[in-house]
Amino acid sequence: MYRPQYALPRPRDCWEQRFHYSYDYTNTPVLDFGFLGVGAHTGRIPLYMDQDADFYLLAIQHQLNGLQLRLETPFGDPLCDSGNTVETTNYVLPALWDETDGAGPVALEGDTSGWGGIFCPRGGVLNLYLNNPTAAPVVMTLVILTLHGKKRYPKEFCL
């Protein structure tokens, strides 16, 4: 579970709720295609967000079985090496990126407003790209990506 070191300011005109999105082959059909071959990479895999509220991404948890990942915000900004914007080469080994080797959620930086998290507007789509640098094909149905964060609802929505 994500717990910030310092308390984040609570917005006055919103109601927040902890939330997570989990993507695997059951709700992301692109992940149900069998194997990703040696040296192969996927195209853009859309990760759809709900239409009811904005989402602030605070942490990522994954089971990628040795795959490298590239994750982009709904605005096309990569959450890895921003110095290289070429989709086919801009991948990161998750173990090096999040420093937990997939063991648990990791706090992310973002949102200069001070409210914390990486802003994803309601109905937004994150883009995921995967690359197989291993010496064997990887079974795609074993890939799981969970995005931890909070949804921010306007107070009038909740009345």
Image: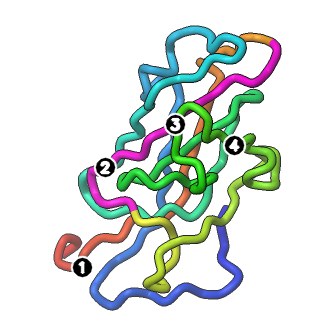
- Amino acid on which the number 1 mark rests in the picture: Lys
Q: Secondary structure at mark 1?
A: helix
Q: How is the image coloured?
A: rainbow
Q: Which comes before the other along the chain, label 3 or label 1?
A: 3
Q: Secondary structure at mark 2?
A: loop
Q: Which residue is mark 4?
A: 92
**Which label sits in the foreground, 1 or 4?**
4
Q: Residue at x 57, y 8 (%)?
A: 34
Q: Which comes before the other along the chain, label 3 or label 4?
A: 3
- The disc placed on residue 50 is 2
Q: Is the residue 74 above or below the residue 14 in the image?
A: above
Q: Which residue is mark 1?
A: 155
Alpha carbon separation for disc pair 1 and 2: 18 Å
- The disc placed on residue 87 is 3
**Which label sits in the foreground, 1 or 2?**
2
Q: Which comes before the other along the chain, label 1 or label 4?
A: 4
Q: Secondary structure at mark 3?
A: loop
Say which of 132 and 48 sits in front.
132
Alpha carbon separation for disc pair 1 and 4: 39 Å
At which x and y percent is residue 132?
69, 23
Q: Residue at x 52, y 77 (%)?
A: 116
- Amino acid on which the number 2 mark rests in the picture: Asp
